[in-house]
Image: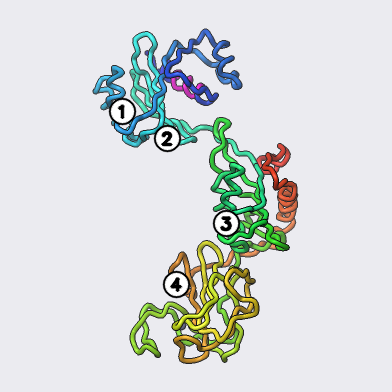
């Protein structure tokens, strides 16, 4: 068999798979001269089969069992060991045979007359096919499948959890992480209120008409009681991320210190002499000294997770800002108005007052900055605030924002829906 012919088998198979021909029966024989017949059964993409110029082939689809040795599968079908060995070497740098996983399917292509195995195909994921050619030319190729992206939208009213609401609607669960990314500075997704509403417009990836993962989250809104947040994705050049309706980055910068007009009386260190305990001990915070009673402010928007008292911390507050950052404020004389666990607070809001409760020698707040569950020195953290948009970019942003907001506003939160083509063109023109 010639190389051209071989290539055609490859192409044939691709077309076959690309058109979504699920070979449900274990074996099927397709003839070149039966194009129309095949097309009828294969439709809807008959066009793709115009270039058939093939002999007959056998297609065998099998599920790889945990203990299957690929070499045995092939040798049982008459492929000699020299060829298998050559294939192993040819595949090594492209897609090694040992990377083929049990539980997935292989399609073996063979000659229907003498059963010679001509090639086999493995699909490691939805996006790729690996073609192992076993005819006179032994080679391996990776074929990327065409991915199409559609703009879709969804929304819901939360009864129990965001996760459940999305699951009920069969929405891709990746959307939760994407929403957290977009709105996590304003909404605490771990403590959602019953009756909260969410809406999202996002890219969905399709391969051969089948939906797979999501692409970008384009816009999102979240309503809790009277408060509504919008996040619109935009690349300002300096910040590729989410902006609010006025064009301000959703991700907020932290205030440098939790107390205005204060001085740092002790810095973060892994080892320092503790004035009360009279021992060397790490100091995992920064002390800001100011007269007792001076307001302590939240360094960023977030949710109060703890407002409590312990012997060491005295009266203290801990806040969660997003999935990465938390802050903690110790030795308060008392809490700010309305401050208790579960309350959302704004950056700059008074959450307590300087005191010397707990293990403290003078009036100060011990400010602790947590990153991914670890205490770090916030003065050494590189956290460049996302830069605001240039005023010149605002008209462009507002135009996009208005469109996306209209898309979000148009979402019926009682059922998911697909947007019209016009909406899609906005992104893919
Ligand atoms: Zn301290």
Q: CA distance from mark 1 to mark 4?
A: 51 Å
Comes first in the chain, label 3 or label 2 = 2
Between 220 and 3, the one nearer to me in the picture: 220
**Local secondary structure at mark 4:** strand
Residue carrying label 2: 124
Please indicate whether residue 362 sits to the left or right of residue 159 in the image. left
Comes first in the chain, label 3 or label 4 = 3
Residue carrying label 1: 70
Comes first in the chain, label 2 or label 1 = 1
Q: Residue at x 37, y 8 (%)?
A: 113
Residue carrying label 4: 376
**Mark 4, residues whose alpha carbon is within 10 Å: few (<14), some, or many (≥20)?**
some
Q: Is residue 288 magenta?
A: no
**Above or below for 213 versus 339:** above
Q: CA distance from mark 4 to mark 2?
A: 41 Å
Comes first in the chain, label 4 or label 2 = 2
**Local secondary structure at mark 3:** helix
Return the x and y of residue 378 as percentages of the image width and height.
49, 74
Return the x and y of residue 126 as percentages of the image width and height.
49, 35
Quadrant hosting residue 204: top right
Between 420 and 103, the one nearer to me in the picture: 103
Return the x and y of residue 304 as percentages of the image width and height.
57, 71
Look at the numbered disc 2 and say if its residue's Cβ is closer than 8 Å to ligand 1. Answer: no
Look at the numbered disc 1 and say if its residue's Cβ is closer than 8 Å to ligand 1. Answer: no
Magenta residues (range): 8-16
């Amino acid at each position: 068999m010639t190389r051209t012919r071989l290539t055609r088998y490859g192409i044939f198979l691709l077309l076959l798979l690309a058109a979504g021909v699920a070979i449900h029966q274990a074996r099927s024989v397709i003839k070149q001269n039966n194009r129309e017949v095949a097309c009828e059964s294969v439709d809807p993409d008959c066009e793709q089969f115009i270039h058939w110029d093939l002999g007959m082939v056998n297609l065998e689809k099998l599920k790889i069992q945990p203990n299957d040795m690929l070499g045995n599968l092939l040798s049982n079908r008459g492929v000699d060991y020299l060829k298998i060995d050559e294939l192993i070497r040819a595949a090594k740098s492209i897609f090694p045979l040992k990377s083929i996983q049990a539980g997935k399917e292989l399609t073996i292509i063979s000659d229907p007359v003498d059963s010679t195995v001509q090639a086999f195909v493995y699909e490691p994921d939805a996006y790729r096919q690996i073609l192992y050619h076993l005819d006179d030319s032994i080679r391996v190729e990776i074929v990327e499948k065409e991915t199409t992206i559609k703009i879709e939208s969804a929304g819901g009213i939360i009864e129990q959890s965001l996760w459940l609401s999305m699951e009920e609607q069969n929405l891709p669960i990746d959307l939760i992480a994407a929403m957290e990314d977009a709105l996590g500075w304003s909404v605490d997704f771990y403590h959602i209120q019953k009756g909260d509403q969410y809406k999202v417009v996002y890219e969905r990836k399709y391969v051969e008409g089948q939906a797979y993962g999501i692409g970008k989250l384009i816009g999102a809104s979240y309503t809790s009681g009277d408060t509504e947040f919008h996040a619109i994705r935009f690349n300002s050049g300096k910040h590729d991320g989410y902006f609010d309706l006025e064009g301000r980055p959703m991700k907020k910068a932290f205030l440098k210190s939790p107390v205005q007009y204060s001085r740092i009386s002790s810095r973060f260190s892994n080892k320092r002499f503790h004035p009360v305990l009279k021992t060397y001990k790490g100091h995992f915070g920064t002390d800001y000294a100011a007269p007792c009673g001076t307001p302590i402010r939240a360094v960023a928007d977030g949710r109060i997770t703890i407002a409590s008292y312990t012997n060491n911390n005295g009266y203290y507050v801990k806040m969660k800002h997003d999935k990465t950052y938390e802050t903690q404020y110790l030795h308060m004389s008392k809490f700010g108005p309305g401050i208790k666990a579960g309350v959302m607070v704004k950056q700059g809001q008074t959450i307590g007052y300087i005191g010397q409760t707990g293990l403290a020698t003078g009036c100060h707040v011990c400010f602790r900055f947590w990153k991914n569950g670890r205490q770090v020195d916030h003065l050494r953290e590189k956290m460049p605030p996302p830069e605001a948009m240039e005023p010149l970019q605002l008209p462009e942003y507002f135009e996009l924002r208005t469109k996306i907001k209209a898309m979000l506003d148009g979402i019926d939160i009682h059922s998911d829906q697909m947007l019209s083509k016009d909406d899609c063109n906005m992104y893919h023109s």
